[in-house]
Every structure is written in C-alpha cells, then in structure tokens.
Image (cartoon, rainbow, N blue to C red):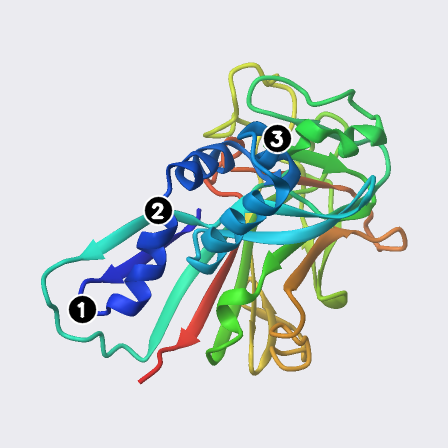
Amino acid sequence: MKYRINLDLYQPEASTVVFRALSSPERLRMIQRLVESPKNISELAEEFSLPLSTAALHVKVLEEAGLIFTEEKPGLRGAQKICVMLAEDVFLSIYHREKNTEPVRSFVYGMPLGNYFDCLVTMPCGIAGRKSNIGTEDAKNSFYRPNRVHAQLLWFTTGFLEYRFSNHSIKSEKLLELEFSFEACSEAPGYSDDWPSDITIWINHEEASTFRSPGDYGDRRGIYSPSWWPDDATQYGDLHRIKINSEGCFCDGRKTSGLNLETLRVTEGDFISFKIGVKEDAEYAGGINLFGERFGNYRQNIEMAVKLERKP
C-alpha cells in the first residue's frame, strides 16, 4: 500500500510541483514502468533512449513531487540509484474546503517484499512469486536474482533481510510515531502449528524487538495463496506491528525496548533501515516465512506508517 498525494487548488505552490512532474509524456511513461517494478536510472535512460543526464533530471522532478523515491544500492560499477514508486494516486480538491484542523496527519509507505537492500540467509530457504518459485528452492543464490523483486513469499532458517525506507518526507516535520507491519510465521519442514521461532527486528541496526512466532501455519489455504502453491506447504502468518514513539518500541502492543524515535535517529541520513530475521543463537531458531500482498491472509507487503504533527 502506497500513499495518496492530496492537492488543493487553493494551495498552488504545492500543487504546481506535482502538475509539472505529470506534464511530461516521458515522465508519465517512466511512472508506468516504475509501477511494474523498480528500475535504476541507467535502465530508464536505455529504455527511453535518453541521455543519462536527461533521465536523471526526470527522476529528480518525479522525486521532488513525491511521486517516487530513490535509494542508492551497490552495483557492478559503483553505486546506482534505484527508483521506486511512492504514490498510489493523486487527488485534487477543486472546491474550497475548511482547513483541516486535525493535529496529526499520517500516511503509509508500502515496500515490495523482494525489494530488500541486503540479505544473509541459511537453508532451508526459498522465494515464491505469484506464478512459480523464483530460482531454485534451498539455493541461497536465489536471493540475489534480479527477478526477486517479484517475490510474494520468502522463507529461510536463520539470517536476515534488510529493507530501506526513504525518510525524505519526515525530515521537515515533527515525527510522532513510526509503525512497521508485516505478515510472518515460523518456517518448519512442510508446516507445523507447533514450531516456535524467535523473530528479531532491528531498526537502524539497533535491536528493537524480538517476538516468538508459535508456528508455521498450513492447516488451511491462505486467503491470497495462489492456486499453484501446494496444499501441504506454509499458507499464512500472523500480522505483526512494531510501533516506535517517544516512549519506546512496542511489538503487538507489548513494550520491548526503551529505544525511541530520537535514540534510533530515524530522521538522520537518507533512509530508515528495517531488518527482520532470526539470530543463530536464538532460543528457538525456527526460521521465518514473510508474506507479500499476493500470499497469505493479508493484502499488504511490508508497510511503514508515519504519524506527523500537522503544521499550523
């Protein structure tokens, strides 16, 4: 789930930035491609037969409008900028309305399951998409395949996946709360309702929370599990929420750490690191299944919800 850009005809400065970004046919075609999957600037330049500098300028305009965000990732020839869709739709209010007096505003970033920045996994492990497995089951190198961006189910025994969320939108306003949510369960051979696993969350590389998943669920098909997926395999997980505010970190309503928004430095740098995994020395190292929006019981990927204090 991504967020809506709300424009007001009576706030022309903010609206003009978005209108300018959408006024170019080339930028509109770029948006179409980014809806399908994230791409780096070189790929966009090549696809539209543009000089690299021109493609970079288009990307900058789209990012300034809040339509996309970019993040640097290591490549074969140094760092490369990956472009990811941020906005789901744009809403324009034409008729004048009373100013919103709610003290808090909020929005949600959706992170595709396969769009992790880094990983370290042990077998058994694997990746599944909407139509088939991605790569070879129990092959760790499958986690580095380019088509991993289409993942809808990921599983491994110990290790981690790291995702990086842009913090661009929260730097200039007072942040009140962050909440990460995701669907997950343990990873057993086949499946087992009684298969505990201690799953750990790190925020900006600080250990924020560990919760115990009771099992790997396969007693009934997941609501969104694709038809090709076998009945005798993992089907769904539990929806977990990691909330961070001025008082600390909370997992599913239970305080797990005194680390807070300030100590985790979530507005520093260019991104917020969200890492999820199972430690080798965990009391119950029972693996993890992580679900995307087209698998399991919940129609979502990994989400970061943000609450900000509304400017007067």
Question: Left or right: where does residue 121 sit relative to residue 296?
Answer: right
Query: Which residue bears the numbered disc 2?
Result: 22
Local crowd size for mark 3, using a 10 Å CA cut-off: few (<14), some (14–19), many (≥20): few
Q: Quadrant of residue 108?
A: bottom left
What is the number of callouts on the image?
3
Q: Earlier in the sequence, mark 2 or mark 3?
A: 2
Farthest residue, direction bottom: 312
Give the foreground label among 1 and 3. Answer: 3
Q: What residue is rendered at 69% in x and 23% in y?
A: 134
SS type, badge 3: helix
Local crowd size for mark 2, using a 10 Å CA cut-off: few (<14), some (14–19), many (≥20): some
Q: Is residue 236 above or below residue 302?
A: above
Give the foreground label among 1 and 2. Answer: 2
Whole-number angstrom distance, CA of label 2 to CA of label 3: 21 Å
Query: Which residue bears the numbered disc 1?
Result: 10
Residue 292 in the image: state x and y as whole percent. 56, 37
Q: Earlier in the sequence, mark 1 or mark 3?
A: 1
Name the foreground residue: 157 vs 78: 78
Q: Amino acid at mark 3?
A: Glu
Residue 241 in the image: state x and y as whole percent. 54, 58
Q: Amino acid at mark 1?
A: Tyr
Q: What residue is rendered at 51% in x and 37% in y?
A: 34
Q: Quadrant of residue 181?
A: bottom right
Q: Amino acid at mark 2?
A: Leu
Q: What residue is rendered at 9% in x and 61% in y?
A: 95
Q: What residue is rendered at 60% in x and 74% in y?
A: 267
Which labelled disc corresponds to residue 23?
none
Question: Left or right: where does residue 293 sit relative to residue 80?
Answer: left
SS type, badge 2: helix
